[in-house]
Image (cartoon, rainbow, N blue to C red):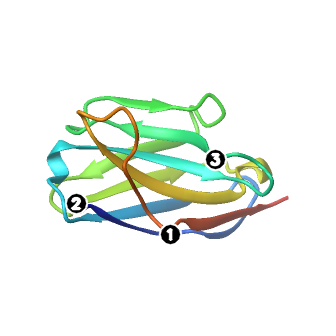
Amino acid sequence: QVQLVESGGGLVQSGGSLRLSCAVSGGAFRTILMGWFRQAPGKEREFVAAISSNGGSTSFADSVKARFTISRDGAKNTVSLQMNSLKPEDTAVYYCAARYGSSSVYQYWGQGTQVTVSS
């Protein structure tokens, strides 16, 4: 059973930066595809970014391209989301998610971490 624990959320002013981390345990990290999602109040959860199991491929939602980067550390079994030039509309609960390549859906989810961007 894969377990995910997010950290790094908080309150930041518009234009600022935050770095979210997700600690992964209980699975074969190097075979797991990782993603970040977010859910703002009153809205559906949406995709933010993803990284392949070997870190060689990444993808981003259009709304965060050029501002966010995703990376993974195989030595520490962590995935990070670096968020720069934050905007008030980035305010949401951010979730780390994982899936194995054989699955088309994310099977495992963290508990979420709150990111609040003030204007």
Q: Secondary structure at mark 1?
A: loop
- The residue located at (53%, 42%) in the rendering is 68
Q: Do the CB atoms of the residues marked 2 and 3 lie less than 8 Å apart? A: no
CA gap, disc 2 to disc 3? 25 Å
Q: Nearer the viewer, residue 12 or 34?
A: 34
Residue denoted by label 2: 77
Residue lying farthest to the right in this orientation:
119
Residue 97 in the image: x percent, y percent? Answer: 41, 51
Which residue was labeled with disc 1? Answer: 8
Kindly report the distance in space between the C-alpha atoms of the residues bearing marks 1 and 2.
16 Å
Q: Say left or right for 7 vs 48.
A: left
Mark 3 and mark 1 in contact (Cβ < 8 Å)?
Answer: no
Residues tagged 1 and 2 counted as in contact (Cβ below 8 A): no
What quarter of the picture does the C terminus occupy?
bottom right
* N-term mark: 1 or 2: 1
Of 47 and 54, the residue lying toward us = 47
**What's the amino acid at mark 2?**
Asn
Q: Which residue is mark 3?
A: 45
Q: Position of residue 67 (x, y in %)?
A: 58, 40
Earlier sequence position, callout 2 versus callout 3: 3
- Specify the label residue 61 is tagged with: none
- Distance from label 1 to label 3 (Cα)? 19 Å
Which of pointers 1 and 3 indicates the residue nearer the eye? 3
Amino acid type, residue under disc 1 in the picture: Gly
Marks 2, 3: nearer the viewer: 3
Q: Position of residue 48 (x, y in %)?
A: 55, 41
Q: Is residue 86 left or right of residue 73?
A: right
Q: Residues within 10 Å of mark 1 (few under 14, many from 20)?
A: some
